[in-house]
Amino acid sequence: MAPGKIDAHHHFLPRPYREAGILGPTRPGNKTPDWSPELAIEVMDTHGIAEAILSIPFAPQGSDAAALVRECNEEAADLRARFPGRFGHFATLPLPDIDASLAEAAYCREALNSDGFLILCRYGVDYLGDDVFNPLLEELDRDGAIIFTHPQVHGTFPVAAPAVLEYPFDTTRMATNLILKGAQRAFPKLRFILSHAGGTLPYLFPRIALAATVISGALERIGDVGEAFRSFYYDTALSAHPGTMAALSAIADPDRILFGTDWPMAPEAIDPSCEGIEALCASATLPGAVMRDNAARLLGRT
């Protein structure tokens, strides 16, 4: 395959999104990170990233969400046209509005040729995997869609920002919900990507596997618990540590681990993320295909 990394967890902050003020309250000092396509490409070139798959960090919600989502998705399509080969895109959906999301998904597939869809781990009290999302998942399953899942800001912990604990816990809860409710068997063609190495999911494998044996009907819904874990794709964003990757490698299919940086939400982590994952590949802790080939197969790149 062609050289150069594919960054499967790479955010963009289009003008309508910045102006809506969605991101500021989640950041230290209420400051939105600097972002432009030119700056993104400069960072990518510095770190040998050939293509970044764009997604907004947090999806807008509320009465005007559908219009704002459409603007963001169309701007991503424009960036792909302006910078051929440098950007892919996981389109945002105006959830929790299912009907509007079905319409936006169809538009993004047919008119924008999006690579997949960003869906947050939860919306209010409803986690992905709950029945309320089934009409959307059923439709996306028909096309074997890629679903890039991302945590949202929910609650605080006084000694650490939400990104330290709440984000990985949010991903863990969502993934556990998908597993125990049998979503992988119910929607077998969907391809779920879990952010940040699945949060704490690898560490909790034995507890979740045990839960599946004591929850009524769980094993009938799930089938093989290990296979449910292996069916997920996992990105390496903010997870470039030997212990983290060793735990992930114990439960994940090595062909389903994807390189990711979380830029520009974690600009200080770009260089350690790249160098750390490269070092783990060189040491055979991770397969070299993590840097590009796994994502290229998933996304249909050559």
Image (cartoon, rainbow, N blue to C red):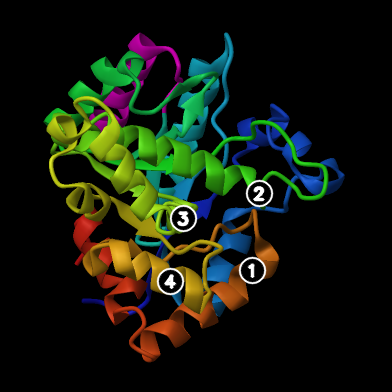
Q: Earlier in the sequence, mark 2 or mark 3?
A: 3
Q: Which stretch did the figure color magenta? A: 93-111
Residue 71 drawn at (x, y percent): 51, 28
**What residue does disc 4 label?**
245
The kind of residue on which mark 1 rests is Ala
Determine the residue positioned at 27% across, 75% down: 289
Q: Earlier in the sequence, mark 3 or mark 1?
A: 3
Q: Nearer the viewer, mark 2 or mark 1?
A: 2
**Circle 3 Cα neighbour tier, 10 Å, few/some/many (<14 / 14–19 / ≥20):** many
What predominant SS class does the magenta segment belong to?
A: helix
Quadrant of residue 234 in the image?
A: bottom left
Q: Of the residues shown, which amino acid type is indicated by label 3?
A: His
Dots 2, 4 in contact, CB < 8 A: no
Mark 1, residue position: 269
Q: Quadrant of residue 255?
A: bottom left
Q: Which numbered mark, 1 or 4, is in the foreground of this view? A: 4
Determine which residue is flagged by label 3: 9
Residues under labels 2 and 4: Cα distance?
Answer: 19 Å
- The tally of labels here is 4
**Residue 250, disc:** none
